[in-house]
Structure formats: C-alpha cells, structure tokens
Image (cartoon, grey):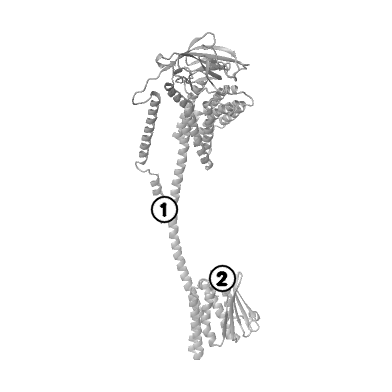
Amino acid sequence: MTENAATTILFDDSARYDTPRPHSPQGRRMFLLGTGTVAVGLIVLLLVRMLHGPVFGGSPVLWTQFFPAAEFLRQETVTDLNAPQADEIAADGPQGDWRLATLPYTGVPRTNVIPSASHGHAMTSWYRFKVAPPATLGKMSNDISFYLPRWKTEGRLAVYQNGHLVWRSHGDIIWNSFNRPVLIDLPIAGPSVILLRMDTLPGLGGAITPAWVGQHDALFWRYRIRIALQCIVPGVFAVVLLSMAVVLFFVALARPDSDLYLLFVFAAVLYTTRILHFLGPLDPSIISPVWFGWATVNSMCWLIVVGWLFCCGLAEVEFRWLKRLLVWGMIACTVATSPLFLSSATISALALCAYIFCFTLSTPTMPLLMAAMWRRRSGSGMLLLFWNMLMFPIAVHDMLMANYYVSIGHIYLLPYITPDLFLSCLYILCRRYINALGLAERSNQILETRLHAQEVTLRDTYERLHQIEQRELLVAERQRLMRDMHDGLGSTLTGAIHMADHAASHEVLAQTLKDCLFDLKLTVDSLEPVDADLLMLLANLRFRLTPRLRAQGVMLEWAVTPLPPLQWLTPSSALHILRILQEVITNILKHAQASHIRLSTETEPPGILVRVEDNGLGFCPDQRTNEGRGLHNICWRANALAGRVDWRLGNPGTNFMLWLPIEQPATRAQPGSP
C-alpha cells in the first residue's frame, strides 16, 4: 500500500467517524423530551393532589381560620435568653397597649449591624390570636393545629394556648429554626387565645408571617409544601451535588488539567456547609454555635469566590491583581470572623458585610468575562455567566429578606439558584470530559487507521525483503558450493585429467577419482539437516571414512560423548568442520603411517572439543618452516567458525584438537576460500 492510499484511508475513515448517523440525535432528543414531559406532568399532578386534595372525586371540607393580622404588644424586658420561657402565663397575655398589626409584621425592626451589649435586656414581642371554631366542629382534641410558615429573630419563640405553654423553639438563640415552618397540635379544640412570645436581642429584629388555625389535615399539606421548599429540597440538592463532587474528585485525580474539577468539588462542599444554615435548629451540644456560624457565613463568601474563579478558568483569563485581592481579602475576612475573636451574634451580623465585599470585588469582572466568552464563542460560558449574573439580584433579595426589608413570608432563593449554577458547571465539565473522550476515540481510530496502513506497508516491505534475502541466500549458497567444488572437486578432477593425459598408472588414477567422489559426498553431507547436532554430522563423517580406513588397515576408535546443540551450525559451518577433519585424517593417512585413529568429543565451556589422536609418527606444525596449504586451510576454517585448532605431540603419534564455541560465533573470515 502506498503512502497516498494510506492517507486516503485515514481521511475517509476520520470523516466517516465525524459524520453523525442520520436520525440518531433527533431520536434521542425526542425520547428525552417525552420522558421529561411525563416527569413534569407527574410532579404537577402530585402538587395539585397535595394542594387541593384528590383530583378526581370530592373530599370533605375541613375548617381553617386564617389570621392576616394579629394583636401586637412590644415590651423591653430583662430576660435570660438561654433560659426556657415560663410554662404558665395569663390567658390573655400581659397587660399593655395592644394594637392590631397586619401580618407579616416586623415587630422589632433591625437597628444595629453589630449587636450591642444587652446585659440581659431583650425585646419581647407578643402576638395574640383569638381562635373561634364553628359550633359544628365540636370538641375534638388533638385535631386542631396551629400553623406558622416562618418566624425569624436572633432569639427564641414560645407558643401558648389559654396561658399554657404548648411549644417553644429549641437550639441556639442565633442559629435557631428561623427557616422551618411551625405546625403545633393544640390541646384545646374549642374557642381559645393563642399567644406568641418572641424574645429578641436588642436591635437585631424579629418578625412573623400570617398564621392559620384549623383541622390538622387541612393544614398539614401547607406545612409539607413549606418545609419541603424551605428545608428538604435545598438539603436534597446539597446531597446530590456532594455526590457528584465525590465522583468528580476521583476524575480530577486522574486528569492533569483538573483545576476546574477541583473547584467544582470545593464549591459543592461549600454549598453543603451553607445549606446547614437553613436546616436548623442548631444543637449546641453537637457543634459550637460560634464555629457553626463562622463556617456557614464564610462558606457563602468562599462560594462566591470559587464561582468567580471557575468562570475565569473556563474563559482562560486571569485577572491577577483582582484575583489576589479577592482571595486574600476573603482570607482576611475568614480570619477576622474567627470564633477566637467574635461571638456567634457578631459573626451572624457581619455576614452582610462579607457578602457585600465579595459582590463588590467580583461584579466589575463580569463584563470582562462576558467579553472573553464572546470572543471564544463559548455558549457554555455564556450560560454560566447568565446564572452568575442572576445570582446578584437573588442575593440582594435574600439579604433584604434576612434584614426584614422584604417580607419574611418569601422563600430564600439562593438555595435554588445556586444548584442551577452548579448544574451549569457540571454540564460544562461533562461536555469537556465527553469532548475529551470523543477526541481520544477519534485519535485512537485515526492512529489505528495509520497503524493498519503502516502494518500493510511493513508487511509488504517485509515480504519484499524476505524474498530478496532468500534470493541472496540462494546466490551465496550457489557461490559457496561452486567455489568449494571448483577449489576441491574441480582441482581433483583436473589433476585426474592431467594424469590420464600423461599415461599415469591405473591405480593412481583410480585413487584420485575415489578421492574426488569422497570430496563430493562430503559436500553433499554438509547440506543434510543436522538440527544443530554436531554428533550427527560427525556420524556422517564416520560413515564416509570407515570404508577408506578399513581398506588401508587403519582402525577407527569412536569415543564421543553427548554434546550441547550448536544453534549456529549451518551448512556452510558444517562443511568447514568436515573439511577440517577430512584434512587432518588425510594427513594422518598420508604422512603419519598410523594404524589406529581415535576420535573423541567433550564439553569444555564455553565450547566443545573435538579431538583426533593417532599412533603414527609425531607431527608438530610449530617445528616446520613451511606448514603447507592444507594446514593453512585448517587454521582459516577454524577462524571462520570463531574456533581454534592445536597440534600436540603424543606418545606416540599426534594429538589434534578442534575447539568450537557453543554460542553464536562472530565471523572472523570471509566465507570464501583463503
């Protein structure tokens, strides 16, 4: 396969991957839209059922009495706010200048940001409701309930019926149950007077919403909806976001660019801490009120900072000095509001200052972030900025509500807007993660296509190289055989022809032709597969030499031992070994006048030793001035095998030794003749 063909496959395959399958996204959208519509319909049906009873069929009408106004009396008292209220009071409440107040009503307006030293002084507000059930209701005990959607104060609340205590608030006086609706079963079902006593720290304010009295079943659905909206749903949001944060935390650990993921995790932890502020009341035996206030107030401030940093990270812009000012300013606020320096009431009062500080510093960057998102054409970033900008009026609403400038009958909206911001962040992170996975899949597919193309190219190249190598091996083997036959068999035949031309004796000519035939058989034996077994090669040599030695009256003693395999034993190497031993034995027959030849083998790591001994005339090449061509060929062939040869005088005769390595030898000579 050519490079152009591989490139064509690559781009065709990549385009096929990028092209969406027809109708698949539209089908998924329709499925999700239908599922969402069914879910919303079920939720609406359940809400209608909770608000108005059964949708189908009638239901009995239950009695309720709504109090849009109440009689109000304010007193400045000396009260220990940490001590419980009295169990019994006058049935109609204390004597004083009672006046009618429209609810919701802030009986004690907020006049101080920082609470002043009260020295036991408290503002006590009294609210009086006169219950007048119809005569047909009867005296059904435990069937009449009192319902108050919300009350708010830095203090405590107690409810009396006809002067008897029926309920009091619990927990810390600052972090009390201000966000929880109150539903109290009244012990008296007939006409009665209900008194609300609210004790408040001076100057920090206190208010209540309109109230209801009626049959329990008529008021319970209101209570359920209110407690769900004010406490349960924000708590569920916090648990869900915290669960997502746990998953993203482990994702962040596996990703190098994990800053945004870690910011989301940090923000989810901060939001969960903040939501504890709305769930109350706080039990001081579990956690100290000052530390609880410090954590919940600062968590909101840090949540604003983390949201701003998330937007900057998404837009890939960095307002260095503003970032330092905001972060270090928040660190200073966190330290300044430490419980080591301030009380619980002071920390609660300083929350507004901390919120204003964060909003003031982060607000100017919103236009700059919007410009950066617009330049990047980032729809996700614009969505995130929308929710961030929407938080500003929502936060203002909640701060005004907390300071009694907006009716406390409203619901705090930040616990609902913040999860939407989180969902936008989660959507962006999921998009980034899915895009990264898609990019990785496309990259893997492109790499796979390229790899396949390279494999095809390499396979073709390997086939061509293998064919070339085979041809070169065949050519080299032919050349080796031709060279060996020319130098050995050819020279012997030439000598025989020369003898025939000069009328040599028949005996000499016959012996020459026999030597020629023996040389040819030896060459053929070198081509036989021996599977790296030197003993098999030596056995073939023994088979060829035995008739010749027997004819000359020489006895061959065979004393070989098992040898390790020689993986390098090729036909060329085998022929070198056979030529060496042939030359040695031929020299013994011609010159040594021996009657006994002994061939033995042994392992001598890192090689093996082939030994040829005779009982003829002694011979040592070092004592001769001219070794002759035969001895020179022996040394050359041994060197080509990375081996060595040696002759030693025996008693009697000569001891010839051929040492061969077991591992692959390094070629020390060209494969041709010397």
Q: Nearer the viewer, residue 331 or 602?
A: 602
Circle 1 or circle 2, nearest the eye: 2
- Position of residue 379 relative to residue 643, above or below, is above
- The spot of residue 254 in percent (x, y) is 52, 43
User: Where in the figure is residue 569, as x and y percent of width and height?
Assistant: 53, 71
Q: Secondary structure at mark 1?
A: helix
**Residue under the point 60% across and 71% down:** 607
> Where is residue 284, by image quadrant?
top right
Q: Is residue 28 visible?
A: yes
Instruction: Look at label 1 and name its amino acid.
Output: Ala
* Residue 308 visible in the snapshot: no
Q: Which numbered tag is attached to residue 23?
A: none
Q: Position of residue 530 (x, y in %)?
A: 50, 73
**Whole-number angstrom distance, CA of label 1 to CA of label 2:** 49 Å
Residue drawn at (47%, 66%), measured in percent from left and top? 469
**How packed is label 2: few (under 14 Cα within 10 Å), some, or many (20 or more)?**
some
Question: Eyeballing the image, is 258 above or below 404?
Answer: below
- In this rendered view, identify the residue nearer to me: 417 or 647: 417
Residue 6 - label? 1
Which quarter shows the C terminus? bottom right
Q: Where residue 564 is drawn, which disc sits there?
A: 2
Residue extending farthest to the left is: 57
Picture quadrant of residue 557 = bottom right
Nearer-the-camera pick, 438 or 158: 158
- Secondary structure of residue under mark 2: loop
Q: Amino acid at mark 2?
A: Pro
